[in-house]
């Protein structure tokens, strides 16, 4: 058979053709007016996506680099922080914080369990010297979305800043930084921003900027003051990922044209169709707080979960994701993120049904695709 | 919603990513050893696909140019010819033949009706001075495949040459030129050869070459002797479509790697799945001789066929084809051709089901996709 690869993993995501084509064009130099204009256009676009009037900085790094940048600009060795760990990326906040010698109060949640603003309020009362709270917006490892709005409501009444890893969630689910009172927002380029990995975006609130004054971590590459100063000159302190910035302009054009609300709604419909499908197949979601980014589904009893993902990927060339860490073999994940459309979901569900059927799992063949189609028939515009 | 375009029309077809990428590379000059090597590699690849030891010529033209090349090299004004017209492209043979002042005996068939070797034998008995018989291998307008093997069996016993328009069929359905005794085979680049339009391929049997000796049509651009002479020097008489030739090398690599038999089987499985789906939806095929290239389906009563195609294309961005000529609004066509896979068919059927459902056609929602999935579950490798 002729093999075509379908990517329905939670990042990287498929890239719009116009953005791909940008990478095939001759590269330009970054210390030029042409590039400065593009950089500033991307800056404005990302501010729109972030919902902020603050500067958003473009760092050549993965999302993890953006997370580290938050920590080294805000804090000092020994500072008390709270990290909310409901999955692999929440766990990462704790790992970075400990690597830098912070005093970490880690809230370890079962993957997919909710965490409320009230719980955070109690935690902050228990640790009144907390300087920062770290959370994820959407946890791709479990397919969850956290209640950042209520977290921000709580932190805004304290001295602690709220730092949010929105790497996978930005653009897919609401997180208006200024409106909600998020202090630090970190995003990545390879999710709903729809370009390849390589850029971390980060913005600080006034409260976060104030905290940087007392921060004693040594820093150079991630020193946001350097980025701020360069931004005033319409440039970057170090060599920017030129092609990615140019590609980002292209996908921001798409986002601005459709509007951020429509982009959330797009993801919501894809997510609803996916969940309707897996429920029709008699499968169970891992998360009690499922979000717009990815759906994590429990492997049914009697099915080898690793073998299942392998068949979907190798036989049908549909790159769903397996489970990470202790959930390897126990769940699979379908992303509905970025440049994906209704038929990417139909494709994923179809490959999943054929594989389950082949592996002897009992269900009504075709019912998943039918359920997804029912959502799309009703909601696709 | 974020719009992604899906192409399931009978040419052009989706192009493999590696072949697309070739077009983004800097162009090279054609009077160079580098290009000559590529040209000869493509020549060998196309000979393999044609199933011939004859030279295959690369003409910068659409498939229609290749058809005209056959006529102006073989015949003279007033010559008697038979054209088999079972659709838009069979009709074109008659149009070209008349434009050049040939004496045309046109066999006009209902679209989708078969035509046998016995019928052709009788026709040749009725017109014993016939110099050439013109047929299509696969008629995309009606989704039919003709029995070229039996036509060749008949013509091989006469002085008439058999000229076959295999523009859409080559690579998708068998037509081994030398084995079957086809005298002239014409193909295009934008179907199962999986690159953009712009190249016509043409090969002549010894019997056809002999006929060129007596041909009196004036010719220059399409004079195959010029192409033959240039080929001896590993080049082309006029500027070749350089990028297309380089792209063609890439897709021929795919074809050679999988093997031509597997390529036919690939198309056969896609076609079977498509037909299983439309039958499950209670729809009727137009053709009594359906082929591997495209499936033409009658629009059910009470449904506005033009509106139907419009919704599938504009709302779902799935580019199935409508009917041509007098079949506009009466049929729709799904291609299963070239760089398409199982999920392109699933996508097409899914969009069709959602559209029919929206338009009030009564059927079991989801049954088409299910039927296609049953074929793929059984046959996809």
Image (cartoon, coloured by chain):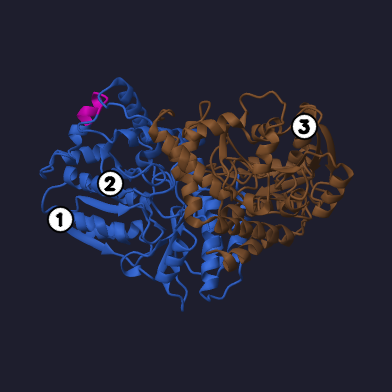
Chain colours: A blue, B brown
Say which residue appears at 51% left-offset and 68% top-offset: A355
- As drawn, which residue projects farthest toward the bottom? A302
Residue under circle 3?
A: B97
Asked if labels 2 and 3 touch by Cβ distance under 8 angstroms, the answer is no
Chain of the residue under label 3: B
Report if residue B43 is visible in the image.
yes
Res A145 label: none
Q: Secondary structure at mark 1?
A: helix
- As drawn, which residue projects farthest toward the top? A33
Residue under circle 2?
A: A62
Number of numbered labels in the structure image: 3
Q: Which residues are magenta?
A: A228-235
**Is A83 colored magenta in this rendering?**
no
> Horizontal placement of A151 versus B9: left or right?
left
> Horizontal placement of B102 versus A327: left or right?
right
- The main secondary structure of the magenta stretch is helix
Q: Secondary structure at mark 3?
A: helix
Q: Position of residue B270 (x, y in %)?
A: 62, 57
> Horizontal placement of A223 versus A298: left or right?
left
Give the mark nearer the N terminus: 2 vs 1.
Answer: 2
Chain of the residue under label 2: A
**Quadrant, the N terminus of chain B:** top right
Q: Residues within 10 Å of mark 1 (few under 14, many from 20)?
A: few
């Amino acid at each position: 058979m002729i093999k075509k690869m379908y990517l329905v993993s939670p990042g990287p995501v498929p890239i719009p053709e116009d953005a791909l084509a940008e990478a095939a064009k001759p590269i330009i130099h970054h210390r030029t007016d042409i590039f400065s204009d593009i950089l500033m256009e991307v800056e404005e676009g990302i501010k729109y996506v972030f919902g902020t009037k603050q500067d958003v900085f473009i760092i050549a790094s993965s999302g993890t680099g953006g997370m580290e940048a938050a920590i080294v600009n805000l804090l000092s060795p020994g500072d008390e922080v709270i990290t909310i760990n409901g999955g692999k990326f929440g766990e990462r906040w704790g790992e970075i914080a400990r690597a830098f010698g912070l005093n970490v109060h880690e809230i370890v949640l079962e993957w997919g369990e909710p965490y409320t603003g009230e719980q955070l309020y109690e935690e902050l009362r228990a640790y009144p010297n907390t300087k920062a709270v770290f959370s994820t917006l959407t946890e791709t490892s479990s397919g969850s979305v956290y209640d950042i709005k209520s977290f921000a409501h709580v932190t805004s009444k304290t001295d602690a800043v709220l730092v949010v890893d929105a790497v996978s969630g930005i653009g897919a689910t609401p997180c208006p930084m200024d409106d909600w009172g998020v202090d630090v927002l970190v995003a990545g380029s390879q999710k709903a921003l729809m370009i390849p990995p390589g850029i971390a975006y980060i913005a600080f609130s006034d409260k976060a900027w104030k905290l940087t004054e007392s921060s004693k971590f040594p820093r150079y590459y991630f020193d946001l003051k350097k980025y701020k100063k360069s931004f005033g000159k319409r440039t970057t302190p170090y060599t920017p990922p030129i092609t990615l910035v140019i590609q980002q302009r292209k996908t921001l054009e798409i986002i601005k044209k459709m509007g951020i609300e429509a982009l959330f709604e797009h993801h919501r419909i894809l997510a609803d169709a996916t969940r309707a499908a897996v429920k029709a197949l008699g499968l169970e979601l891992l998360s009690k707080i499922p979000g717009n980014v990815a759906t994590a589904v429990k492997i049914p009893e009697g099915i080898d979960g690793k073998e299942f993902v392998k068949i979907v990927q190798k036989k049908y060339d549909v790159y769903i994701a397996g489970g990470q860490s202790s959930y390897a073999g126990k769940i699979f994940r379908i992303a509905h993120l970025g440049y994906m459309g209704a038929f990417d979901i139909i494709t994923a569900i179809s490959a999943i049904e054929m594989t389950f059927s082949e592996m002897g799992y009992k269900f009504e063949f075709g019912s998943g695709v039918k359920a997804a189609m029912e959502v799309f028939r009703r909601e696709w515009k």
